[in-house]
Amino acid sequence: MAVLVTGGNRGIGLAIAREFQDAGEAVAVTHRGPEAPSGMFGVRCDVTDAEQVDAAFDEAEAELGPITTVVANAGITDDQLLLRMDEEQFTRVVDTNLTGAYRVAKRGARTMLRQRRGRLVFVSSVVGFRGEAGQANYAASKAGLLGLARSLARELGSRGITANVVAPGLITTDMTDALPEARKKQILDGVPLGRCGEPAEVAAVVRWLASDQAGYVTGALIPVDGGAGMGH
Ligand code: NDP
């Protein structure tokens, strides 16, 4: 049984892939650029294209066997205040973060239904549940993941498939390196633990959700945010 992590070539996705690999699991990561990270089995895939998603799963399964854990992690931001946000900016973020997760879950579930076992884990964000000025597109996409996961939890539960959401807070990656220092400080003022999280701290929760120990956990939203959302 294998694991596929979208956007597993860097940041939180790469930490998740490493966490599974270190535990001895067979792992595939998706990447858009020419190279997979060293030591990782990579498949090219842009999650905005259903054909690429299907082909990536086919290629990964031909190499690693049935994929029964899928981590929908690929995501983007494109921040703008509402009146300046054009429709393309809104739909592009939703298409990547939410519709991309639907495409990946749909292909992933095909194998899981055959195996009568599966783990779907969606990487959302604290922003999806608190909202954030300038992030209406991102927050909408991340909140949507919860409705997606809970519907799939109901639809697929009788086949031994769980669907859960992890909602990270401010985690040190390229995505947050792009934030101005003053903005980071402002965010951290609202974080009881008073620091950024590490990608490995998100990865540990994702792996637990995929483990047998979490066999009775489905439709859950687990914040990994230093207390920023207080459980939402
Ligand atoms: P990064 O920007 O470091 O990495 C994003 C990853 O998503 C990259 O691997 C990127 O691929 C991939 N990706 C983006 N668009 C697509 C696409 N269309 N098809 C396939 N892959 C794509 O972000 P993080 O590691 O920080 O974020 C990972 C996830 O965690 C995201 O969903 C993000 O929203 C979420 N998150 C992050 C937080 C943080 O503080 N960092 C907080 C809360 C949630 P490529 O290298 O090709 O660009």
Image (tube, grey):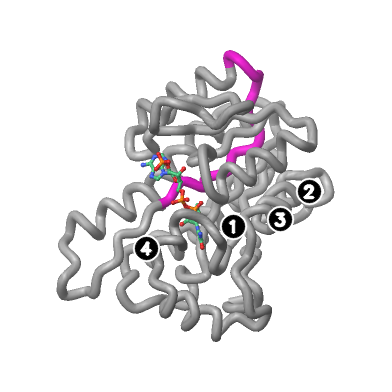
Instruction: Identify the residue at horizontal 30%, vertical 73% (top origin).
Output: 134
Q: In the image, is residue 61 above or below residue 15?
A: above
Task: Name the residue at the right extreme.
Answer: 213
Give the residues drawn in magenta, as a range.
62-75
Between circles 3 and 1, the one closer to the viewer is 3
Q: Secondary structure at mark 3?
A: helix
- In-front residue for pair 88/38: 38
**For mark 4, what is the residue?**
138
CA distance for labels 2 and 4 = 30 Å
User: Residue 13: x percent and y percent?
Assistant: 56, 45
**For mark 1, what is the residue?**
165
CA distance for labels 2 and 3 = 14 Å
CA distance for labels 3 and 1 = 10 Å
Q: In the image, is residue 54 above or below residue 147?
A: above
User: Residue 148: x percent and y percent?
Assistant: 49, 54
Earlier residue among tags 2 and 3? 3
What residue type is disc 2 on? Gly
CA distance for labels 1 and 4 = 16 Å
**For mark 2, what is the residue?**
215
What residue type is disc 1 on? Val
- In-front residue for pair 60/23: 23
Earlier residue among tags 3 and 4? 4
